Amino acid sequence: MSGLEIERKFIVSKAKAFKSLAFAHQTIKQGYIPCQDATVRIRTKGDKSFLTIKSRSVDGGLSRYEFEKEITHEEAENLFKLCKGGMIEKERFFIKSGEHTFEVDEFYGDNEGLIMAEVELSSIDEPFIKPDFIEKEVTGDKRFYNSFLLHFPYKLWKDKWAEEQLQSKEP
């Protein structure tokens, strides 16, 4: 698969139940191979493995070119050895909302406590129904890119971010 990826990212409220809405879920493990001009990701999702290359975004994080190819589990394990900085581990839940499917990721390890949702769109201005478990949009905020979370885990900056959110809500 290759082409333009258009997606929006959101923080999921910990107070709202989302798991019971899921029609499927899978465990994901992913690592990143260092590359200056793109993101090169190795990922296992359930019993499948993938090599993905994503370009830099030119429109604030809303869209970017993506190339993805399924690879064997053995190839993924060998490529994981080239990854730097450890692994991202998470559970992904698939939840329908209107005509779209939201992918909700609950992170583990150093990113424990972070729950994010994303929805892929066919155009930048495509309308969608936002589920009630969505708290705040973070599209384009690099702190919420998986490749960033690998090197600067959520546990290191979550308190500061929570404080920023409280201050932005004050009148």
Image (cartoon, rainbow, N blue to C red):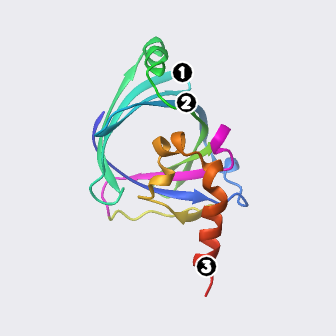
Q: Is 69 above or below relative to 130?
A: above
Q: Residue at x 70, y 60 (%)?
A: 16
Q: Which residue matches tag 3? A: 169
Residues under labels 3 and 1: Cα distance?
Answer: 43 Å
Was residue 155 drawn as part of the magenta stretch in this picture? no
Q: Which quadrant holds the N terminus?
A: top left
Q: Amino acid at mark 1?
A: Asp
Q: Is residue 125 visible?
A: yes
Q: Which residue is mark 1?
A: 47
Amino acid type assigned to the residue bearing label 3 in the image:
Lys
Q: Residues within 10 Å of mark 2 (few under 14, many from 20)?
A: few
- Real-space Cα separation, disc 1 to disc 2, in angstroms: 20 Å
Kind of element beneath mark 1: loop
**x, y (%) of residue 153?**
59, 45
Indicate the position of residue 66 as horizontal and vertical percent values.
Answer: 31, 40
What crowding class fits label 3: few (fewer than 14 Cα within 10 Å), some (14-19), or many (20 or more)?
A: few
**Quick one: label 1 or label 2, which is nearer the N terminus?**
1
In the figure, is residue 10 to the left or right of 110? left
**Dot placed on the residue nearer the N-terminal end, 3 or 1:** 1
The magenta segment = 108-124
Residue shown at 56% from the left, 26% from the top:
46
Report which residue position mark 2 lands on: 86
Residue in the foreground of this view, choosing between 44 and 87: 87
